[in-house]
Image (spheres, rainbow, N blue to C red):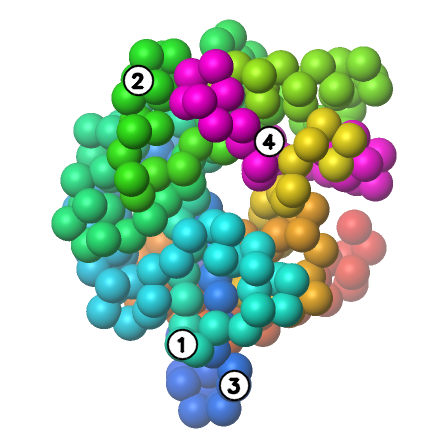
Amino acid sequence: MRTNSRPVQDFVWSVLHTLARIVPHQPRMTVLMYHAITEADGFFAVSPNDFDAQMKYVRAHAEPVTLAQAFEHAQGNRVKRDSVAVTFDDGYLDFSTHALEVLKREGIPATVFVLGDAPDRKELGNDLVLMNADQVRSLSKEPLVAIESHALSHRKLKHLTPAELMHELTESRRLIEERTGTKPVYIAYPKGSYNGPVIEAVKKAGYEGACSVIERGVRPGDEVFALPRVQVDRSTTLALFAAKLSLAADWYYALWLFAKRLRGK
Ligand SMILES: [Zn+2]
């Protein structure tokens, strides 16, 4: 087990999770956001063993669904039991070497958001190996895997000029279609960065939905161009993972927003 370095947060999570188990609620939809699955250092890197345990938990306690089903839930299509969609940002090669086997074993679909051929490593913040064009091509043949867009460079989309923004959105679609034979329909905003003009450009470029990093469950009526996703990272113990799939996630997010407002940020 990992050492507990965030005692206050973990205590709040465990109280909320206890309450979440007794409060009646509609079946939930959660979209998980992963990055790398590796023993390598990095806050966003989940170890293969932890990932394995997390996917077993999903299989045992929820209905694994595609990202498209999560978008349908936002559009009003309710689910019959708690459901989980799994996504991976950046397109690290360790998805193929460490995650895919587990996903296949558990029968869990996944969406991988890939970048262009020469992303900005400083913006990405690590040196982990990304999939090349051929690796993306062969991964796209896996029935459980969908390849979608994470734009090209990993720069924050809301800081780009309109021309740069449109290039990131359309060139990414073109590259992915060239590699997979299928046009991507979803995009994950690099670093969760978006605003009104970014959403308009994403629609204009032909995308049907976009993923953000709003850390709560998906609710019917949610904006499909800023779909909430819950982050799983190195600090996520299995107890915290279970709490993040529950109503506790929505409450924790509300508390976080409240605290942020109090601090005047
Ligand atoms: Zn990213």
Which of the two discs, 4 and 1, labels the residue nearer the N terminus? 1
**Which residue is drawn at the image coordinates 54% and 28% (left, top)?**
183
Between tags 2 and 4, which lies in front?
A: 2
Q: Position of residue 60 (x, y in %)?
A: 23, 69
| Amino acid identity at mark 1 | Arg
| Badge 4 residue CB within 8 Å of ligand 1 | yes
Q: How far is mark 1 from mark 2, CA to CA?
A: 35 Å
Residue contact between numbered discs 2 and 4, judged by CB atoms under 8 Å: no
Could you say whether the residue bearing mark 3 is in a helix, strand or loop? loop
Residue contact between numbered discs 1 and 2, judged by CB atoms under 8 Å: no
| Amino acid identity at mark 3 | His
Q: Quadrant of residue 192?
A: top right
How crowded is the residue under tag 4: few (<14 C-alpha within 10 Å), some, or many (20+)?
A: many
| Amino acid identity at mark 4 | Pro
Name the residue beneath numbered marker 3.
Answer: 25
Q: How far is mark 3 from mark 1, CA to CA?
A: 11 Å
Q: How far is mark 3 from mark 4, CA to CA?
A: 32 Å
How crowded is the residue under tag 3: few (<14 C-alpha within 10 Å), some, or many (20+)?
A: few
Q: How far is mark 4 from mark 1, CA to CA?
A: 30 Å
Q: Which mark is residue 190?
A: 4
Name the residue beneath numbered marker 1.
Answer: 81
* Residue interval drawn in magenta: 177-202
| Badge 3 residue CB within 8 Å of ligand 1 | no
Could you say whether the residue bearing mark 4 is in a helix, strand or loop? helix
Q: Position of residue 216 (x, y in %)?
A: 56, 62
Q: How far is mark 2 from mark 4, CA to CA?
A: 21 Å
Which of the two discs, 1 and 2, labels the residue nearer the N terminus? 1
